[in-house]
Image (cartoon, helix red, strand yellow):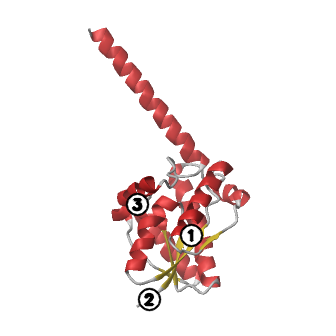
Amino acid sequence: MTVNILLHICCAPCAIYPIEELRREGHKVGGFFYNPNIHPYSEYLKRKESVQKYGQEMSLNVVVGDYDIEGYFQHIVYNEAIANRCPVCWWLRIARSAKFAKDNGFDAFTTTLLGSPYQDQETIKNLCEDIAKKIGVKFYYKDFRSGFKASHDTARSKGIYCQNYCGCVFSEKERIEKKQKSKSKDSQSRAGSGLAR
């Protein structure tokens, strides 16, 4: 049975496999790019442009939601710890996508977030199910993680912009701190090896 599905898209590389898979199953797919969590604004623009370009290439109609940076921070404040921050961020983006799906005649919605091995699949699934009940639109669940690596390989081969952090300013800070710690450990290890000789 063909279902008209709205796919919430976080970035172009993560959209490749879900679009292919949903179409392979015979569904009609529309895209919705709503990600006010992405910072800085220049990064947001890169990802948006990449999604729009890939959408055109795939004959996928992609609607871009507003960049509600103020709303994002109002939801995140006092929830900055990763255990709280990510679910709040997912909820904000998925709820807006589900509402757009309902308001625009889609049968169901889903999200590319279900394709990332770096996100909490079970929490995202539960949030989607809860939002679907509250808003009154179906949630189409599929674990897209099996296509993650191939999608990103395809993106690189096509010259599609591939980011190196989740999107929010907190994840960028955590990525850099992790890199610095790793560098510091390597330096200490090399220094220790030198002393051992």
Cα gap from disc 2 to disc 1, whole angstroms: 22 Å
- How far across and how far down the image is residue 44, in percent? 63, 54
Mark 2 nearby-residue class (10 Å; few <14, some 14–19, many ≥20): few
Q: Residue at x 57, y 63 (%)?
A: 53
In the image, 103: left or right of 167? right
- The image quarter containing residue 157 is bottom left
Quadrant where the N terminus is found in the figure: bottom left
Task: Say what secondary structure mark 2 lies in.
Answer: loop
Question: Mark 3 vs mark 1: which is more N-terminal?
Answer: 1
Q: Which residue is mark 1?
A: 56
Name the image quarter holding the C terminus. Answer: top left
- Judge whether 52 appears above or below 185 on screen: below
Give the residue at the far left of this rendering.
197
Task: Identify residue for label 3.
Answer: 151
Measure how far apart labels 3 and 1 are at the Cα level.
Answer: 17 Å
Residue 129 drawn above or below residue 158: below
